[in-house]
Amino acid sequence: MNKRERLTKTFAGEATDRVPVALWRHWPGDDQRSADLARSTLEFQKHYDWDFVKITPASSFCVTDYGVQDEWEGSLEGTRTILKRAVNRSLDWTDLRPLEPTRGSLGRQLECMRLVCDGLHTDDVPIIQTIFSPLAQAKSIAGRDMLVRHMRTNPDRLHTGLNAITETTLRFIEAMKKYPVAGIYYAIQQASYDVLSEEEYKTFGLPYDRKILESVPDKWWFNMIHLHGDAPMFKLCSQLKAQAINWHDQETEPDLIQGKLQFKGAVCGGLSRGRHLHQGTPSAIRDQARLAMTQTNSRSFILSTGCVIMATTPLSNIRAVRDVVEGG
């Protein structure tokens, strides 16, 4: 059974020869240059032979052309620290304009995508590109506290900015269509009860998320939603259009069993990137992975972590994740 067959059957809840598996990570430093990010991504895939490749650029790749400045300061996660925001007052949202996706940081990411596609047999290895939701991008542009303040004090101005960000994202997706990718990994960060009320997300997040996910072409057969952080609005977001969903199932509710009951596609997780992958042992990882496969009956389940693995994750632990689905 090849990777596409395995994943397609997994989405449909059908039996497969084994559970699909994949891990992904940030590439600090390498993520500032198209060729270097592509090479790191390809070498990671060549070494571990995951069931799909998630292209993971710097989280700021979609906002630097608005004026955001950042640098990597040693985060083990590989994420970069934002040093300068593009929005400091509510009126700044009205200055945002849709960006041209073939230029600047967005253009470099398209070039990276081209190189990854050229470096893999995409009929054999599905590729999904990370896309951040408009509200997640707005958080990077203004900062979490400023975003929430403007949401509650100047909603019209914020909507103006979100419309510009959404248009840029749609243009980027349109530009992606020339490459043989399988779909997108759609990262939602603010659909969390620890961050917003459900009504706030329904007003400032959900309409834009629906617009983007409903814009993806039918030929993209593998789109995954990622719900970042604790207390996700899982029931609400599980209704969005996607074939798989990924969240921090080992740290927050719902657990895998509950999530599987609420989502019609495949649930992706079963392992903690910290407790299991970063701090655990190969033996503990194998035990946890087997438990997750038992809990899901190895149906509609992709073995992974709830988010990017740490850049300093022991290689023996990564190997254990890959080997366990083969019975190792």
Image (tube, helix red, strand yellow):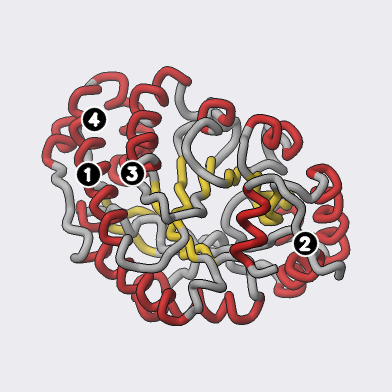
Q: Position of residue 30 (x, y in %)?
A: 42, 75
Q: Earlier in the sequence, mark 3 or mark 2?
A: 2
Q: Residue at x 17, y 57 (%)?
A: 100
Amino acid type at image mark 1: Glu
Q: Residue at x 28, y 49 (%)?
A: 169
Q: Residue at x 22, y 44 (%)?
A: 167
* Position of 133 relative to 159 (above/below): below
Mark 2: few/some/many CA within 10 Å (<14, 14-19, 20+): some
Q: Earlier in the sequence, mark 3 or mark 1?
A: 1
Q: Is residue 279 left or right of residue 3?
A: right
User: Depth-wise, is mark 3 or mark 4 nearer the camera?
Assistant: 3
Q: Which residue is mark 3?
A: 215
Q: Which residue is mark 4?
A: 158
Q: Is residue 127 visible?
A: yes
Amino acid type at image mark 4: Leu
User: In what quadrant of the picture does the C terminus appear?
Assistant: bottom right
Distance of label 1 from label 4 (alpha carbons): 14 Å
Distance of label 3 from label 4 (alpha carbons): 22 Å
User: Depth-wise, is mark 1 or mark 4 nearer the camera?
Assistant: 1
Q: Earlier in the sequence, mark 3 or mark 4?
A: 4
Q: Position of residue 29 (x, y in %)?
A: 42, 73
Amino acid type at image mark 2: Arg
Q: Earlier in the sequence, mark 4 or mark 2?
A: 2
Q: Are marks 4 and 2 in contact (CB under 8 Å)?
A: no
Q: Secondary structure at mark 2?
A: loop
Q: Which residue is mark 2?
A: 18
Q: Which mark is residue 167?
A: 1
Distance of label 4 from label 2 (alpha carbons): 46 Å
* Position of 310 relative to 49 (above/below): above
User: Depth-wise, is mark 1 or mark 2 nearer the camera?
Assistant: 2
Q: Residue at x 34, y 27 (%)?
A: 204
